[in-house]
Amino acid sequence: MNIEIAMRVCGFLFLFLLVLYLPMAAFGYKIGLGPYDSDAELQKINKHPKKLQIGIVLSLMSRGSIIALAIMLFIVFGSYSLILGIVWTISRIGEGLGQFYNEKKYWGLLNIARQYSGTSGAEKNALSARTWHCTVFGESGLSCSGV
């Protein structure tokens, strides 16, 4: 592959990732830590489950783009330091694959939201706690209990 073409593909993938995060947030896929009201979020998910599903699909597209970008950057810049390039590429691919695996936890929020709408009292609080743990700690790679 021509290096100039590979560099253009890298630039496109990077810009694609930046642009992709905007609709992900618009479709209900939250990134990062912050104030979180699990009751309100579960009600939003239950009212509009398609929005979260679209957000998850967009997220999967971004994870695939991260892996593709790592491979393309290795192709472009691997000749400068082969060992560093291999280590960096393997770590980025591992990170992308880990995030792919983590997406099933977000898909589990759909099931929790359905259960949440039909419960009350202590069971509702337990589902709310499971949701908080899944969304707040899920992005950092920690396990999501109960989902």
Image: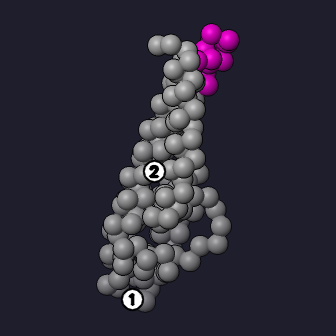
Q: Nearer the viewer, residue 9 or 28?
A: 9
Q: Element under label 2?
A: helix
The residue under the point 53% across, 35% down is: 12
Name the one closer to the observer, 102 or 41. Answer: 41
Q: Quadrant of residue 47?
A: bottom left
Q: Is residue 75 visible?
A: yes
Choose mark 2 or mark 1, whichever is in front. 2
For label 1, the residue is 120
Mark 2 and mark 1 residues within 8 Å of each other at the beta carbon: no
Q: Amino acid at mark 1?
A: Ser
Q: Residues within 10 Å of mark 1 (few under 14, many from 20)?
A: few
Res. 131 mark: none
Q: Determine whether 102 is above or below 89 in the image.
A: below
Q: Vertically, is 118 above or below 84?
A: below
Picture quadrant where residue 90 is located: top right
**Dominant secondary structure (helix, strand or loop) of the stretch shown in magenta:** helix
Which mark identifies residue 59? 2
Is residue 137 visible in the rendered structure shown here? Answer: no
User: From which residue to which does the magenta span run?
Assistant: 76-90
User: For numbered disc 1, what is the local secondary structure?
Assistant: loop
